[in-house]
Image (cartoon, rainbow, N blue to C red):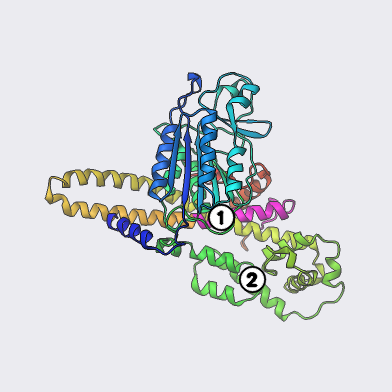
Amino acid sequence: MFLKRIVLVLLIATAPAGAYAANRVALLIGNSNYDNPDLSLRNPVNDAELLAQSLRDLDFDVTVVTDEDRDGMQAAINDFGAAAEGAEMAVFFYAGHGVQIDGSNYLIGRDFSGNDVDALLAGGLPMGAVRDVLTVAKPEIGIIILDACRNNPFVESGTVPKGLARSQGGAGLLLAYSTDPGNVAYDGAGNNSVFAEALANNLPTDGLEARLMFGRVRQEVILATRGAQVPWVEEATLGEHYFANPGDTPAVNVASAREMQVWREISVRSDIEPFEAYIADFPDGMFRQFAEDRIRMLQQARLSGSRAGQTSGEILANAEPTRVAAALETLGFLTDTRSLSIVTQNSLTSAFDVYRAQLLNPETATPETLYVDAARMTMFLAATTAQQIRTDIVALSAIDRTLTIARDALRQIEDIAASNPDALPLLQQARADVDAITASQNEVLARLDATRTYYQSLLDNAYENFPDEITYDLMDVQGTSGGLSRLQERLARDAEQFVRHVQGLTPENKGTYAWLIDFLPKT
């Protein structure tokens, strides 16, 4: 590992311009020791220092400010804005007290005094000040991370609402909150908050795109707190951005997530060959049944002749084009709906022609039947994906426990081997064991990156396009024998769970991954 680190440093040092942009800057503020002792917190300064070291190791130019007053924070942010001009990545982190007032968030300086809203406004720095300097600086990506949702006397007295408010970012910005809007984060039982520890664990992961990295952080916090804390992210960024070396993605991670990547690419295709190739490449794949069904549907559509009665154009005349396009894409009869401006009425009617052709009775096709079929397909895909997520979260929990034990044993053997050469063979084996367990952990994490993202996309699609069609009785899993197999029972339960997730989704919790709580292992 040491040798690998040296090689990586040499590669970065000798890489051509563009391997990393000219500068990566970070400002970390931690306020623990407030002038008012009732406000003091244990971990914010520790959290800022922990993440500062992680970012320095990743070649960030880091500034750490601790226990600062409002004016000092403003001065540091102004300097940060100047340093962030044209940067590849600009990261702002704040740990301490924060409050929401009239829908805006304020970061509370060390010198705060008072007990009313006017005092909070005077002693608090608007989070918008950070957003504004990044908007002017225009880094390739600006990242604002707030671990500022600790409980405080202002909430308990009813002076301000609990937690922070949902805040819009802006083009090129990613906002990450330690917990979802209106809730409270935990300061942590040790030297760092749960959120800061999760960040420190995942920031150095090579080849992990920033949005996936924050996805892992959210997943880790949810698992660590048993769902009591659910981090939230909002972003409007383009392209891919990496904290750690983008060119060093472990091969095992690529292999473990390949099936999901392939499926997501082909699931909206309207030709048979990609599905045949999927079955050949993944004969026991998660989505084999769906691939076989899609092949049959498309073959039936190819064999069907012209239809009497209303044309597809007439049937769709009064339907909402965006919703029709989303349903046809879900079923694999229309591609590229992400650029709806180029989806013409002719392409919709042509795709609807193919959809009608594969039905047993094409004349029964209506926009409503299309939406129901798309909703049913979404539920099947979500339930199948949910089973993989549940399996992997249980596996991850077991691997984490095993890895903790193995690392503890390795440290003990290293101490013994330092003075006893006879222990060197055992030390070599212990290191190999830790490496093997870590590889298994990476494989599960990579698969969870893929399945977690896909499940969220299915949830968003259902919420945005088919919320009324997603119902408990939509998914028929009855077997020919009249009973349900164990697999079918699990599928039915996961389908019902997906219905609850869709029904529980709101603009406020959309994208928080709060649904992961339902996948926690039972203890």
Q: Residue at x 62, y 22 (%)?
A: 119
Q: Label 2 neighbourhood size at 10 Å, few (<14), some (14-19), many (20+)?
A: many
Residues at marks 2 and 1 touching, judged by CB atoms closer than 8 Å: no
Judge whether residue 146 can be spotted in this image: no
In reply to whether residue 509 is colored magenta, the answer given is: no
- The residue identified by callout 2 is 269
3D distance between C-alphas at marks 2 and 1: 20 Å
For marks 2 and 1, the one nearer the N-term is: 2
Relative to 437, say whether 313 is above or below: below
Q: Residue at x 64, y 41 (%)?
A: 167
Image location (x, y in percent) of residue 315: 84, 67
Judging depth in this view, the residue of 425 and 118 nearest the camera is 118
Q: Secondary structure at mark 2?
A: loop
Image location (x, y in percent) of residue 333: 70, 70
Residue 445 appears left or right of 173:
left
Q: Amino acid at mark 1?
A: Thr
Image location (x, y in percent) of residue 325: 73, 64
Q: Amino acid at mark 2?
A: Arg
Image location (x, y in percent) of residue 430: 25, 52
Relative to 20, say whether 165 is above or below: above
Would you identify the image quadrant in which residue 351 lies?
bottom right
- The residue identified by callout 1 is 453
Q: Label 1 neighbourhood size at 10 Å, few (<14), some (14-19), many (20+)?
A: some
In reply to whether residue 453 is colored magenta, the answer given is: yes
Q: Secondary structure at mark 1?
A: helix
The span shown in magenta is 449-477
Relative to 152, say whether 469 is above or below: below
Q: Residue at x 63, y 20 (%)?
A: 116
Which quadrant would the N terminus be assigned to in this image?
bottom left
Judge whether residue 279 can be spotted in this image: yes
Judging depth in this view, the residue of 65 and 373 nearest the camera is 65
